[in-house]
Amino acid sequence: MAKGDYIVSLDIGTSKVRAIIGESNGNSLNVIGVGSAEGEGIRHGSIVDIDLTVESIREAVEHAERMVGIHIAAAYVGVSGNHIQLQSSHGVVAVSSVDREIGEEDIERVLQQARVIALPPEREIIDVVAKEYIVDGLRGIVDPRGMLGVRLEVDAYLITGSRTAIHNVVRCVERAGIEVANLVLLPLAASHVALTSDERKLGVALVDVGAGATTVSIFDNGILAGTSIIPMGGDYVTHDIAIGLRTQTTAAEQVKLQHACALVAEASDHEQFRVPRMGSNQEVQFTQYDLATIIEPRMQEIFALVRKEVEKLGYSHELPGGYVFHGGVMAMPGAGKLASEELNAPVRVAVPEYLGVRDPSFINGVGILSYAMRSHFRSQPAEAGTASRPVRTGGGLMARIKDWWRDFI
């Protein structure tokens, strides 16, 4: 991106849909606009109502547009879910230049070669990510550009997803009047702002505790080694509060945001609040301690499931980098400490350090922006008053989606 170009991310979550506008400032990124809307039409991370989801996207985008005073034409869209799979692949090409210097074209060709594998008809490649490059047998190369060689290889993994799930996301965004610049895997995007390079190399579990589901991703030797979904998240905490206090879900959510504490030992008897009792006009008074006795068991259950999921992914031994959590529910006081006690491991709650955005729930949206800037995406110059329309090298994503969907139906 050139200095002054805009780039837009769209994070379609269960509880919130967020549109974030970033501006390139040389090699750095500034967040200049944020729009959010309630995630109507989405349950447990999956779209269950197209029309409601479209309205949520429109509302979030319009909010961001008003904040910055530009028109958003295209956005990078995050994807996640149980349908996502990682598959190893290998590509080999001959270096094309006469002087045998490896250039951008050679890297693109070898990555395209890695895409050439047989896939079931119901799956589609979302992205290809290089683990390492190999130049004339020399392994462990991160960026081969400018090196001399005859034979260029890449060990990569393909990120594939369900065609139906991908189509539903793309269709919602397009019906909201936004072009999909590209799809980005959320755990991969979040890692660019949530993890340090040492954590990625040594081994770390990145955990996104969303409203409807919890995503567990393992990074080892600098790459994404595995990812999995737990169908439980912050909405379960809200549901428990609603039952425990015998109040409506909306009131329970407000109480969670304003008075929650994840640890009973750190909760206060002096912090009091009132909630309307279900089925009557009466309000009942409770303390933060009362609330913590409801929240702590559910949070313990979520953390226990995270540990089991990490073990299923083949990392039963202690991860040197421990666990890095993000997601709105992790902003709750005591959540990080409770996770550390339950997992018996180092725990850190990631917070984006970009201008105006200091909330664990913004990691995914800001991560998409950062990933798009650092990866092999390219963007066209922005027209006056219009967010730029980024184009991916090798292109044709939307045409491919439309083509295979016509075949699929």
Image (cartoon, grey):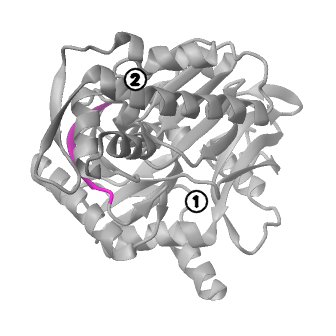
Name the outermost residue toward the right. 137
Give the camera-side residue of 183 and 229.
Answer: 229
Picture disc at residue 262: 2
Q: Which residue is mark 1?
A: 394
- Quadrant into which the C terminus falls: bottom right
Q: Estimate how packed mark 2 is, as few (under 14), some (14 to 19) or many (20 or more) residues with alpha carbons within 10 Å.
A: many
Horizontal and vertical percent position of residue 281? 10, 52
Picture disc at residue 220: none
In the rendered structure, does residue 3 fall within the stretch colored magenta? no
| Residue 353 visible here | no
Q: Is there CB contact under 8 Å for labels 1 and 2?
A: no
- Disc 1 marks a residue whose amino acid type is Gly
- Disc 2 marks a residue whose amino acid type is Ala
Residue range of the region highlighted in magenta in the rendering:
26-39
Q: Is residue 365 above or below residue 335?
A: below
Horizontal and vertical percent position of residue 156? 75, 43
| Residue 55 visible here | yes
Name the image quarter holding residue 270: top left
Q: Residue at position x 35%, y 55% from top?
A: 380
In the rendered structure, does residue 37 fall within the stretch colored magenta? yes
Horizontal and vertical percent position of residue 383? 21, 57
Q: Is residue 79 above or below residue 296?
A: below
Q: Residue at position x 30%, y 49% from top?
A: 18
Q: Earlier in the sequence, mark 1 or mark 2?
A: 2
Horizontal and vertical percent position of residue 131? 72, 35
Give the camera-side residue of 162 and 51.
Answer: 51
